[in-house]
Amino acid sequence: SVLKELYQVQRLLESETGALSSLFSMVGDMSIWLAPDGDRILQSHFRLDDLVGQQMQGNCLSSVMSSEEMSRLRSCLSAMAPPGESSESGEAPPVMKLTVSIDGKNSRKDDLDLYIVRAMEGHKATQTSKLSDSAYLIGAFFVAKDHNARVNDAVEGSADEND
């Protein structure tokens, strides 16, 4: 039946999204989920929280990025269509890369390479989810300069909080 096929497609999308999230977590410095509005953070990562000096889950990415950076991010997101659809300009790329500057704690600017996928929010997808409700899964990587120092700082910062 059509409903059964739709359910199977949804389950496949959820599985693929979970695999992408796991992959970003294994090979990247952090992974985060952005809401469909492209600003509110649905699920943060301890490295992002440490980088900006506050818990970001539920907060807006625009609170730690300049308006110019947010404009660039929104342009990138608007070029991406929901899973299974094509964008207004034709076939939407499955993954987009964008380098952005984040306002880190202590007035430090940190550059991140963002690899952005528009996908069903795997950890919250339900049978009532619609493809148009898809969120953005972002794998973030520190830009090469001072990469190891920043990762170590983030890990040590989270360890200090757990002590």
Image: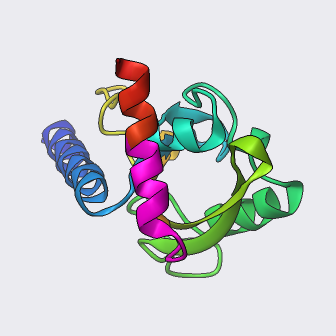
Q: Is residue 117 visible?
A: no
Image quadrant containing the N terminus: top left
| Residue 98, image quadrant | bottom right
Q: Would residue 85 be counted in the magenta stretch? A: no
> Residue 159 at x, y = what percent?
35, 30
> Residue 51 at x, y = what percent?
58, 44
Left or right: where does residue 39 sit relative to residue 136? right
| Residue 6, image quadrant | top left
Residue at the farthest bottom position:
90
Left or right: where does residue 61 sit relative to residue 112? right
Which stretch is magenta?
A: 143-155
> Residue 94 at x, y = what percent?
41, 72
Which color mode does the image show?
Answer: rainbow
Relative to 142, residue 35 above or below: above
For the image, the number of numbered tags is 0
For this rendering, which residue is in front, 14 or 153? 153
Q: Name which residue lies at 76% across and 67% down.
A: 72
